[in-house]
């Protein structure tokens, strides 16, 4: 598929120029190793630089010979597969809106279930908080349920969505995100408390600080 030079971004325009050079190489030296490499780079540039996914898939399918055939098949498989990853990037203060980062592909919307967890009870029982997000929630009634459309959805595109969570106040929450047979779970912690430690040759001094008030917490 012949592309039209895009306006605006210099990086995109440069990618378009390289694309034309590779197309000329494939046309002039068919069946050679440089042409095989150029055919793969045509597809890779269409996918990664120009975000032209349908043309990219067509170009990958033309990589049927040489050392790039395997890599092309991997890209075709990944572009056609569904993907769902949920990630909590940090602890949130009570003055902030907690959010989960969703990375997805080929999913138009997801169902979200939120479960409030008593982290102290879990820790006293298990002596760790590792794995709390893997709790079996199938038989537990969620505290919140809602559907979220995937931002900027386009078939084959890897999308990132900032999923804001509808709760306020300190607490620990297990957030389950699902779409048919795909699901991802992450732990969200909302707390103003942080453990501050200072070390010297003579020992370690530690205290709990309220990060919103910017002062130590009494009796800790």
Image (cartoon, rainbow, N blue to C red):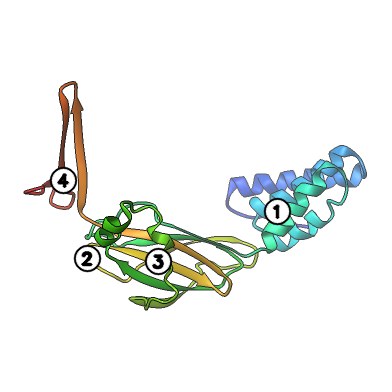
Distance in Å between CA atoms under marks 2 and 3: 16 Å
Q: Position of residue 101 (x, y in %)?
A: 44, 59
Q: Nearer the viewer, mark 1 or mark 4?
A: 4
Any mark on residue 169, and which? Answer: 2
Q: Quadrant of residue 172?
A: bottom left
Q: Which residue is mark 4?
A: 208
Q: Nearer the viewer, mark 3 or mark 1?
A: 3
The local crowd at label 1, few if under 14, some if 14 to 19, many if 20 or more residues have their Cα within 10 Å, is many
The local crowd at label 3, few if under 14, some if 14 to 19, many if 20 or more residues have their Cα within 10 Å, is many
Q: Observer-nearest residue: 188 or 55?
A: 188
- Between discs 2 and 3, the one toward the N terminus: 2
Q: Secondary structure at mark 3?
A: strand
Any mark on residue 46, and which? Answer: 1
Q: Is disc 3 in contact with disc 1, using a CB cutoff of under 8 Å?
A: no
Q: Is disc 2 in contact with disc 3, using a CB cutoff of under 8 Å?
A: no
Residue 52 visible in the snapshot: no
The local crowd at label 4, few if under 14, some if 14 to 19, many if 20 or more residues have their Cα within 10 Å, is some
- Between discs 1 and 2, the one toward the N terminus: 1
Q: Quadrant of residue 92?
A: bottom left
Residue in the image at 16% along x and 45% along y: 208
Q: Which residue is mark 3?
A: 175
Furthest residue toward top: 201
Residue in the image at 73% along x and 52% along y: 74
Q: Position of residue 16 (x, y in %)?
A: 70, 49
């Amino acid at each position: 598929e012949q592309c039209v030079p895009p306006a605006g971004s210099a990086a995109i325009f440069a990618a378009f120029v390289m694309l034309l050079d590779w197309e000329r190489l494939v046309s002039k030296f068919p069946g050679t190793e440089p042409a095989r490499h150029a055919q793969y780079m045509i597809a890779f540039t269409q996918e990664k630089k120009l975000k032209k996914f349908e043309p990219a898939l067509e170009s990958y399918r033309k990589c049927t010979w040489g050392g790039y055939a395997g890599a092309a098949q991997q890209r075709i498989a990944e572009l056609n597969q569904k993907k769902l990853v949920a990630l909590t990037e940090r602890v949130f203060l009570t003055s902030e809106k907690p959010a989960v980062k969703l990375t997805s592909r080929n999913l138009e919307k997801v169902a979200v279930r939120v479960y409030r967890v008593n982290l102290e009870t879990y820790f006293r029982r298990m002596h760790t908080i590792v794995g709390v997000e893997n709790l079996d929630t199938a038989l537990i009634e969620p505290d919140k349920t809602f559907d979220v459309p995937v931002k900027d959805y386009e078939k084959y595109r890897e999308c990132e969505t900032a999923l804001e969570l509808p709760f306020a106040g300190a607490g620990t929450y297990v957030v389950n995100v699902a779409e048919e047979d795909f699901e991802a779970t992450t732990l969200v912690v909302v707390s103003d408390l942080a453990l501050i430690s200072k070390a010297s040759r003579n020992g370690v001094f530690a205290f709990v600080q309220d990060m919103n008030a910017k002062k130590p917490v009494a009796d800790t």
